[in-house]
Image (tube, rainbow, N blue to C red):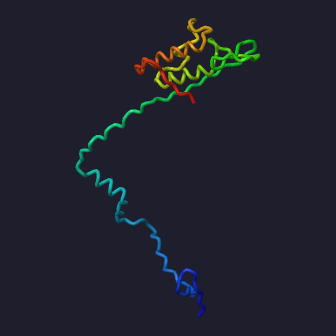
């Protein structure tokens, strides 16, 4: 009889052929005896018949002291118009085609402030159909958004973090 040793076992490994257990025959037709339910089904059935236990309502987590808004703005660039970004006029042969001055940066900031307050976007608060906003500087929109912010939070001065 030949034998081999294992690196992991102290006893020798047998090389004799192994015999398999006889395979169980598959029934030709399904069994008529009821099957036992799975553990998950049994647990669900048991829980269904248990008397209801009064569960104390968990206290609500405290509201976070900050809100987040996301601003987005887009204008077509046309020749001969001023290009203003962040309130700064940038020398360029093209500028933003808009009802106001088209400052995309300040429009984004205003839109983010309005969004954080849960208000409609800049286009609904300052519509281009209103002649008051024709050619308006975007700092006017910033002041209006700041007023809404201070009214919402009952603050004297707004504080923003722009990322």
Residue at the limit of the structure toward the left, as seen here: 51
Q: What residue sits 37% from the left and 60% below the top?
A: 38
- Quarter of the figure that contains the C terminus: top right
Q: What residue sits 53% from the left and 20% below the top?
A: 121
Residue at the limit of the structure toward the top, as seen here: 131
Q: Is residue 99 left or right of residue 148?
A: right
Q: Is residue 84 left or right of residue 115?
A: right
From the top left corner, tell me how far across and down residue 107 is, in percent: 59, 19
Relative to 123, say whether 51 is above or below.
below
Residue at the limit of the structure toward the bottom, as seen here: 1
> Which of the two residues, 9 or 150, is positioned nearer the viewer here?
150
Q: Is residue 87 left or right of residue 54?
A: right
> How many marks on residues?
0
> Which of the two residues, 53 or 110, is positioned nearer the viewer here?
110
Relative to 131, say whether 151 is above or below.
below
> Which of the two residues, 156 or 51, is positioned nearer the viewer here?
156
From the top left corner, tell me how far across and down residue 140 is, in percent: 56, 12
Q: What residue sits 51% from the left and 23% below the top?
A: 113
From the top left corner, tell me how far across and down residue 12 is, in percent: 55, 87
- Quarter of the figure that contains the N terminus: bottom right
């Amino acid at each position: 009889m030949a034998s081999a040793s294992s690196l992991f076992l102290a006893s020798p490994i047998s090389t004799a052929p192994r015999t398999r257990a006889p395979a169980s025959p598959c029934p030709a037709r399904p069994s008529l005896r009821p099957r036992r339910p799975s553990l998950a089904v049994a647990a669900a059935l048991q829980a269904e018949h248990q008397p209801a236990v009064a569960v104390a309502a968990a206290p609500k987590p405290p509201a976070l002291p900050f809100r987040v808004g996301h601003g987005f703005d887009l204008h077509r660039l046309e020749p001969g118009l001023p290009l203003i970004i962040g309130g700064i006029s940038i020398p360029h042969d093209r500028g933003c085609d808009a009802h106001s001055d088209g400052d995309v940066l300040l429009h984004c900031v205003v839109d983010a402030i309005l969004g954080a307050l849960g208000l409609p976007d800049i286009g609904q608060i300052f519509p281009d159909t209103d002649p008051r906003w024709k050619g308006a500087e975007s700092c006017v929109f910033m002041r209006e958004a700041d007023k809404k912010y201070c009214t919402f939070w009952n603050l004297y001065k707004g504080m923003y973090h722009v990322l």
